[in-house]
Image: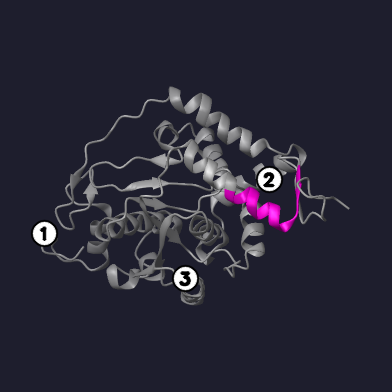
């Protein structure tokens, strides 16, 4: 039986990559301190900032919102209802329950009212659903963060997400994406600062925190995620991690410390979209162009954003 390294009580978890055995109390404490340390390391935000946490109903985003609230940050939630049948309804219900149980503020955006649901868009788009879904979520996160006066958008991207993305970009040597892969994307020309406070935590570590904190979350994957290349990359990295604990963290952190500073990122010029006013590199942003494809009408600056 493993014992907690802090108090010698029975450990509930052993973290091989950190060589740590911890009881419930000290795991919760370790997790919160590590989140705080990550926020400070990358200078993500301060206690004065208003933080908007993008929540999906999953373990990562709800664990993030919970720990930020516990640490004393001014953090509210934003849930974007993608309209994916029962999956989205259950996700919305759990986000709403989480907020009400803790007396927290949750903003809800109904994608169907803004443009169309993901299943409806899939009927006219040839791209994989994950492609345009991610695009839409980024658009509405930024739009509502600005409208509601938040200084920072925090997402629940974890180490598995970041290391899988890094592997994908390295395999294709996508220098543009590699130069932008960092836990902080600074505010600029209409974009609110975006941060990833859980970038050093694995899915399992976040799931354990959620379980010990009594957080109910959606366990199933999004129905449209089946067959995504990111899942394959995660499986490959998990196999390596099993044989050599700590590989994912070293892979990701060594990239940030040693390679990312060497990559040059050319700042593209941003302008307000002619239709909605959100920042874009073209005259009309991708979301407004998508809206036109769904309901073909001449675009005008009077169209709703």
Query: What is the count of numbered marks?
Result: 3
Which of disc 2 and disc 3 is earlier in sequence?
A: 3
For disc 3, the neighbor class at 10 Å (few under 14, some 14 to 19, many from 20) is some
Secondary structure, mark 2, is helix
Query: From the viewer's perspective, is residue 207 above or below residue 94?
Result: above
For disc 1, the neighbor class at 10 Å (few under 14, some 14 to 19, many from 20) is few
Identify the residue shown where x is 10% and y is 64%: 302
Foreground: disc 3 or disc 2 = 3
Write down the residue under mark 1.
301
The spot of residue 98 in percent (x, y) is 51, 71
User: Closest to the observer: 36 or 275?
Assistant: 36
Identify the residue shown where x is 79% and y is 54%: 11
Magenta-span inclusion, residue 26 = yes
Write down the residue under mark 2.
238
Query: From the viewer's perspective, is residue 143 above or below residue 116?
Result: above
Secondary structure, mark 3, is helix
Write down the residue under mark 3.
99
Horizontal side of 57 relative to 180 (left or right) equals right
Query: From the viewer's perspective, is residue 265 above or below residue 86?
Result: above
Q: Which residues are magenta?
A: 20-32
Horizontal side of 10 relative to 182 (left or right) equals right
């Amino acid at each position: 039986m493993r014992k907690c390294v802090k108090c010698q009580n029975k450990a509930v978890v052993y973290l091989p990559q950190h060589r740590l055995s911890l009881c419930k109390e000290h795991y919760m404490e370790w997790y919160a301190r590590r989140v705080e340390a990550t926020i400070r390391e990358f200078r993500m935000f301060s206690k004065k900032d208003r933080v908007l946490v993008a929540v999906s109903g999953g373990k990562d985003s709800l664990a993030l919102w919970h720990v930020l609230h516990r640490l004393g940050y001014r953090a509210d939630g934003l849930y974007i209802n993608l309209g994916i049948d029962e999956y989205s309804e259950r996700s919305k219900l759990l986000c709403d329950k989480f907020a009400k149980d803790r007396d927290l503020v949750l903003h809800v955006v109904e994608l169907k009212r803004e443009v169309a649901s993901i299943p409806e868009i899939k009927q006219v788009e040839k791209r994989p659903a994950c492609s345009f879904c991610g695009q839409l979520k980024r658009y509405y996160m930024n739009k509502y963060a600005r409208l509601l006066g938040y200084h920072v958008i925090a997402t629940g991207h974890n180490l598995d997400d970041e290391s899988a993305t890094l592997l994908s970009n390295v395999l294709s040597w996508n220098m543009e994406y590699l130069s932008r892969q960092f836990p902080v994307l600074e505010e600029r020309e209409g974009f609110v600062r975006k941060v990833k406070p859980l970038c050093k935590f694995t899915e399992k570590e976040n799931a354990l925190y959620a379980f010990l904190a009594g957080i109910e979350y959606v366990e199933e994957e999004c129905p449209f995620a089946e067959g995504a290349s990111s899942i394959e990359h995660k499986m490959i990295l998990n196999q390596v991690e099993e044989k050599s604990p700590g590989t994912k963290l070293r892979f990701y952190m060594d990239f940030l410390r040693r390679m990312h500073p060497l990559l040059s990122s050319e700042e593209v010029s941003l302008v307000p979209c002619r239709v909605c006013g959100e920042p874009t590199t073209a005259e009309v942003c991708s979301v407004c162009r998508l809206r036109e494809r769904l309901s073909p009408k001449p675009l005008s600056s009077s169209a709703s954003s």
